[in-house]
Image (spheres, coloured by chain):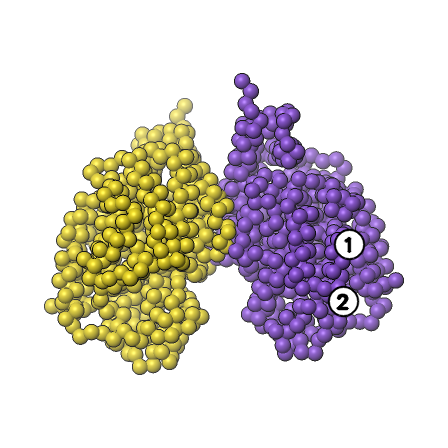
Chain colours: A yellow, B purple
Amino acid sequence: MMIASDSLYQQYSDHMRRVADLRYAAAVLQWDQETYMPQKGAGARARQLATLSETAHEWATAAAFEKLVYELQQRGDLNAVQQRNIALSYDELVRRKKLSAAFVRRSSEAVSRAFQSWIAARKANDFKLFQSSLSELVGLKAEEADLLGYEGHPYNALIYEYERSASVKSLDALFGALMPALQQLIDAVRQQPEPDTSFLQQNYPKEQQWKWGMYLVKELGFDLEAGRQDLSEHPFTTNFSAKDVRITTRIDENDLANMTWSCIHEVGHALYEQGLPNEEYGLPSGEYASLSIHESQSRLWENCVGRSLVFWQHYLPELKRFFPEQLKEVDPERFFRGINKVEPSLIRTEADELTYHSHVYIRYVIEKELISRELPVKEVAARWNELYRDHLGVTVKDDVTGCLQDVHWSHGSFGYFPTYSLGSLYAAQFWHQAQQVMPALNSQLNNVQLAGLLKWLRTEIHAKGRTLETEALCREVTGEGLDSRFFVGYIRQKFMLP
Amino acid sequence: MMIASDSLYQQYSDHMRRVADLRYAAAVLQWDQETYMPQKGAGARARQLATLSETAHEWATAAAFEKLVYELQQRGDLNAVQQRNIALSYDELVRRKKLSAAFVRRSSEAVSRAFQSWIAARKANDFKLFQSSLSELVGLKAEEADLLGYEGHPYNALIYEYERSASVKSLDALFGALMPALQQLIDAVRQQPEPDTSFLQQNYPKEQQWKWGMYLVKELGFDLEAGRQDLSEHPFTTNFSAKDVRITTRIDENDLANMTWSCIHEVGHALYEQGLPNEEYGLPSGEYASLSIHESQSRLWENCVGRSLVFWQHYLPELKRFFPEQLKEVDPERFFRGINKVEPSLIRTEADELTYHSHVYIRYVIEKELISRELPVKEVAARWNELYRDHLGVTVKDDVTGCLQDVHWSHGSFGYFPTYSLGSLYAAQFWHQAQQVMPALNSQLNNVQLAGLLKWLRTEIHAKGRTLETEALCREVTGEGLDSRFFVGYIRQKFMLP
């Protein structure tokens, strides 16, 4: 007797949701680790996370589940979403099975240790304290690439984890074309009169910044009954369902920009997560489409919205309620010019929209070299500093503002950074489309327009989960595949370049 | 070939620690649920916790592990601690195997729902909103008692979870003797001039109370690198290893007492957890001896230390640094008398040391009646109010200050309350012993003496983990089994009764 496909698919869903329970539980433990966990808790936390990862891996690759997925793949009577879920799960299974549970446990433990070393190294402002952890992770990642298999460059195996459509070949081509185009734009912008940014670097008390940040995330549509914001060393977004999405920020008392655009950026991620279909919990159809699309959401809000003149025409008066003294003499035009100053700098998360891509490119180059073992880990700081000199013309003074600035490597995330540039390009393309559909966005951005924008994103992108591949989604939303001309056009318009 | 006991014991330890990883992960999710989780996160959290509980249960009762424990039980070459661990694990296994994984999952989900109903019912001040959840839990607990089996009263099966040495018979005898003795003491104390407590009910701003609480927990020896304090609806202590112990408190702006003694109480629990042998992580030898002993630690600090005259002779001047205006005219004697005012009241956690036991007794009676199905759940509020009138002579005005005041039932904890009275009695007996060993405790209590006391508790109680049963531990520390004359003597001395 043949078991009905419905019943098999139900078994599949149940199993997937249980694996998701473990993964989300691990995410709670990680969130806690980066927000509230006391220092000495790190040892036990590492093993707890390792047990969760290892178990999730075992379940995700269990023989009975594998049989179920293979069986469902043969069935002709599944609907399109079900078929897509099964196809993605099949692909995932094939990849996951190449890694042993012991390898997954080892990786998880190494990541926990590495995160602690990264914190310590940052505190001491000394890359050497992170070096041996990084070595271990690079070794594990290179091993992972070998286990997973790849065509061409071993780094491809890792990029695939974050963006299935990207590869060293496609990224080399992308950056190869993008970087010179950006350089032209940068040169053109830097011939304009230098904007004043001094109003951003004043004393902005922490508590007021916190209140401002909370106000801002609410205005942008973040549902605080289905999420929260906390402080952490490095801002991030995580979620434990579409109804529990956590963002974090950090506050620099002498810089308003740091936390303001990190709030907008993370809330962009969070709005996406809160808009995913909660009833598809644990299934691919309930997940984000890809990391590039995730990043397109954060960067659309951060830059296209949050660095636009019309946004600040409405919100600067609100911001002044929080900081009346500091911003007394600043008008929206001056504010807009100040927050869009283009200038090569040291810190990626604080970079302007143009030089930002050089930061990403440098990390991409280093990761490629690390994974292919061309670059020894002990030379990472020197290589970093060299690339910053060559590509951005800036001198790195120390490790905290150099190669220790990002948390990603300490998380074992190699192949992640390129999605930041991809995300910016998708963001500009989606934003262009949104402006076509809702021309009012060009002339006014208060919470009514923002709600309209969010509604459009919810329908066009969020609610679709992972039912489409990155490029297919882009085509469905904008009528064509990714094209960097939208980004270039967006920049030309913002800086009023001919 | 016979496998060496060492190697088998290692396998046993590894497995136990992995089960602990899951249980502690669940504890992190629960801590988050009660401190920071946004409201709408409850649904997914319930299923995540259920998956963790169910999996921990499956692992803890796995056939291969059972075989291992049975095998180790036959070995004659284990040391005493190893033997004890195996014996406790065996006992646990026999009990756990009586519950199916599905039953454990069902219970976990019911508890998550019940906790949310309890929060909602408290908000609405309406027991009826909690009633159906409570019904479900009582049903599950009665079923659990049947599955576990018992002699005499079904409630015995549940008490055993928290205090192996207690039963309805022993507790009826204990309360039967204790309650009249307490009534005599209460009558005698209430013939003394009425203490002034007005200085406690003034405006004590939240932020200052928070700072004072943090100061206090540090003074008492709480290691903030291995723990933290947060706010929650109901104060509690939890831990994810001996190196990550979390306490929570709540603040009433018009009452200094509420948070002050809740901080001391919870830190008493936390000091015990931080003193457990971390190298025994996941094994019985790394756990607390019993809930009565756990409560003895919280109540020793809360009452024997924290409500003593000598403690406040030193700490009142410190407290005044936080609240100079409010406490300007209060001296240590007046303070001491005020914080020890004996008066029947509505709220257990705010009750004095004497009437406290009536609160516990009332819950004990109701739980017995619920589990034996003598008392229908819909009559809980009425029964509660009746017992408060009969035993404390107070009139319950509403559900929040009545039967909705404690979180325990919403956690599915039935059989827990009696350990509060047992803990008070053990506390008095341990405190008596400590005073014998360190007579200075009678005349001075600053952070030097407190550190000495903590050191003694660490050696005598904390470091022993669960290597001894409650009564055996009491005998090892004090030379005799539990005797309520120490509690009576302690009260007589405090209130200078003849």
Q: Residue furthest left?
A: A498
Q: Which residue is mark 1?
A: B436
Quarter of the rendering containing residue A298: bottom left
**Relative to B469, is B489 on the left or the right?**
right
In the rendered image, residue B425, in percent from the top left (x then y), is placed at: 76, 52
Instruction: Tell me residue A4's x, y (percent).
Output: 39, 30
From what the image shows, is residue A415 above or below residue A441? above
Residue B490 point in image, percent of width and height = 79, 58
* The C terminus of chain A, quarter of image: bottom left
- State which chain disc 2 sits on: B
Between A338 and A80, the one lying in front of the other is A338
Which residue is label 2 attached to? B341
Taking the spot 59% from the left edge, 67% from the top edge, the residue there is B212
Query: Is A185 or A433 nearer to us in this picture?
Result: A185
Res. A313 in view: no
Looking at this view, name the residue that lies furthest to the top.
B1
- Vertical order, B445 against A110 (above or below): below
Instruction: Name the amino acid, label 2.
Output: Lys
Task: Tell me the residue at 63%/78% (across/down).
Answer: B325
Between A249 and A138, the one nearer to me in the picture: A138
Instruction: Check disc 1 and give the amino acid type.
Output: Gln
| 10 Å crowding of disc 2: few (<14), some (14-19), many (20+) | some
Parent chain of label 1: B
Does the image show residue B192? Answer: yes
Which quadrant holds residue B355? bottom right
As measured in the structure, the alpha-carbon distance from the residue carrying label 2 to the one carrying label 1 is 27 Å
The earlier-in-sequence mark between 2 and 1 is 2
Q: Nearer the viewer, residue A376 or A202?
A: A376
Per the image, label 1 sits on a secondary structure element best described as helix
Question: Which quadrant of the figure contains the N terminus of chain A?
Answer: top left
Mark on residue A485?
none
